[in-house]
Image (cartoon, rainbow, N blue to C red):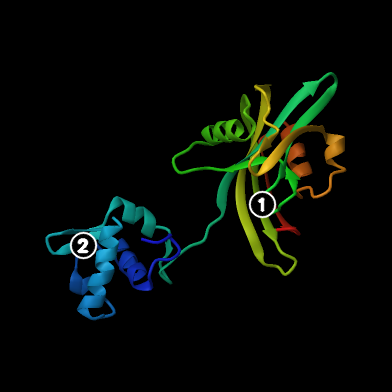
Amino acid sequence: MKSKYEIHPVQSDILVYLLFHNNSRFSEINVNKLDTDSFNFHLKSLLEAGLIEKKDTTYSLTLKGKEFANRFDTNISQIEKQAKLGVVLICTKKEQDHTLYLMQQRLKHPFYGYNGFITGKITWGETVNETATRELQEETNLTGTISLAGIEHKMDYSDQSQLLEDKFFYVCKITDIKGTLHEQFQGGRNFWVEKQEIEKMDNLFDDVLFLIEMIETNTLTFQEQKFIVKGF
């Protein structure tokens, strides 16, 4: 089976049909009356992918198939594109009377050269805390105390009003930092800096200062914003 967005329309129709019917026969599933050889090919592909199963003479969705097909817009038999889920990590530490923030310059596309906070995708079956712990270790070699500061819904648009990215971030404040910082890694570099220096940076992600305000409020916060971006 190819990626989830490349499934054949006939196979999409089969999965959507089986969402609403249990233990269906070949003739019932073949709503569009395709020739037997063609329809058998698509059934076989779904069986091999583990999305459907056959018992005696009837077909039904497997557990994997139910999860997969449940993502469909059933009116048009297509996978619904949804916002991505991730974490954004705002690490802080005190040096004398100064508060420092751990920033990351992105050295991969999209947004090559932009400065912001550490982010990472939440993987299947992973908690927010597990994601934050893993991403912090992988990208900085640090550990710390993780607390949830809020949730951000961030939508980035081109200047032609094309939606480029749609993401929900769990905003995590990281304190009690321990370990030796890896300043360089594949895809970026990490560095500590004061807020006053952040405000003067070029190629700064639009939400950075909002995120600093979020963790400074000490109350769980939700923010939802649309940005027109350059350098994608």
**Amino acid type at mark 2:** Tyr
Q: Is residue 190 above or below residue 144?
A: below
* Dot label at residue 59: 2
CA–CA distance in space, label 1 to label 2: 41 Å
**Amino acid type at mark 1:** Lys
- At 24% from the left and 59% from the top, the residue drawn is 60
Residue 175, position in %: x, y?
Answer: 68, 25
**Residue 194 in sight in this render:** yes
Say few, some or many: other residues with alpha carbon within 10 Å of mark 1 (under 14 / 14 to 19 / 20 or more).
some
Question: Label 1: which residue?
Answer: 154
Query: Residue lying furthest top in this view?
Result: 96
Residue 104, position in %: x, y?
Answer: 72, 39
Query: Residue lying furthest left in this view?
Result: 56
**Residue 30 in sight in this render:** no
Residue 225, position in %: x, y?
Answer: 71, 53
Q: Could you say whether the residue bearing mark 2 is in a helix, strand or loop?
A: strand
- At 73% from the left and 57% from the top, the residue drawn is 227
Q: Could you say whether the residue bearing mark 1 is in a helix, strand or loop?
A: strand
Q: Nearer the viewer, residue 79 or 215?
A: 79
- At 34% from the left and 66% from the top, the residue drawn is 16
Say few, some or many: other residues with alpha carbon within 10 Å of mark 2 (under 14 / 14 to 19 / 20 or more).
many
The image quadrant that residue 23 belongs to is: bottom left
The image quadrant that residue 33 belongs to is: bottom left
Q: Nearer the viewer, residue 107 or 203?
A: 107
* Dot label at residue 189: none
Q: Quadrant of the C terminus?
A: bottom right
Q: Are marks 1 and 2 in contact (CB under 8 Å)?
A: no
> Between disc 1 and disc 2, whose residue precedes?
2
Q: Quadrant of the N terminus?
A: bottom left
- At 25% from the left and 74% from the top, the residue drawn is 39
Image position of 197 (left or right of 88): right
Residue 74, position in %: x, y?
Answer: 40, 67
